[in-house]
Amino acid sequence: MGSTINPLPWSLSLFSRKLTRSIAIGTAAIAAAIGAYAIVNSGSSNGASGTANAAPLAQPGQNQRVVGQVPQNWRPGTGTIITGAAADEAKAAAVAKYPGGTVNRVLKLSDGSYAVHQIKISWPHHVFVSKTFEVTGAIG
């Protein structure tokens, strides 16, 4: 009589390889997601205190329009992020002078004045407000 081939071991082997590959792909996807989350959140701040983590911006030059006065010691990324009544007043002054953008942070500068950072606006991105909440200058 003839011999018969048992298809069961081959089927289990194929199933086992597919399962192992699926688990490996799923694990890699989870690891990539965790890594991406960590990278995105590594530069975040709670906004309560500390120095702002602002992206560097070129100093006033050919590509930037400057109006009024920029505080003498101001550089992109300087200042302390603030919230509360003073931040609200500085924001109100900046938005009244330059409407249309979204204020995403207010920074208190070393001289006691404020830098209001606007996004979703073509110009200006930084509006400078005095200690008495008057707009003194802007830079894009």
Image (cartoon, helix red, strand yellow):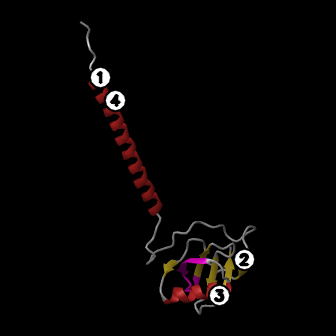
Circle 2 or circle 3, nearest the eye:
3
In the image, which residues are magenta?
A: 102-114
The picture places residue 7, in percent across and down from the top left corner, at 29, 22
| Position above or below: 139 against 11 | below
Cα distance between the residues tagged 4 and 1: 11 Å
Q: Is residue 97 above or below residue 65?
A: below
* Tag 2–tag 3 contact (CB < 8 Å): no
| Label 1 with label 2: CB-CB less than 8 Å | no
The residue that label 3 is drawn on is 96
> Dot 1: what SS?
loop
The kind of residue tagged 2 is Val
State how far apart marks 2 and 3 are (Cα): 18 Å
Q: Earlier in the sequence, mark 4 or mark 1?
A: 1
| The furthest residue to the bottom | 132
SS for callout 2: strand
Per the image, the residue denoted by label 2 is 66
Mark found first going from the N terminus, 1 or 3:
1
Q: Earlier in the sequence, mark 2 or mark 4?
A: 4
- For mark 1, does the 10 Å Cα neighbourhood hold few (<14), some (14 to 19), or many (20 or more) residues? few
**Residue at point 72%, 77% (across, down):** 66
Q: Earlier in the sequence, mark 4 or mark 3?
A: 4
Judging by the rendered image, the residue that carries numbered circle 1 is: 7
Q: Label 2: few (<14), some or many (≥20) within 10 Å?
A: some
Q: Compared to 121, does 112 lie above or below?
A: below
Determine which residue is flagged by label 4.
14
Q: Is residue 125 left or right of residue 105?
A: right
Q: Measuring 43% from the left and 73% from the top, which residue is drawn there? A: 46
Q: State the quadrant of the C terminus.
A: bottom right
How far is the residue under mark 1 from the one under mark 2? 79 Å
Q: Which residue is at 48% across, 83% downward?
A: 83
Q: Which mark is residue 50?
A: none
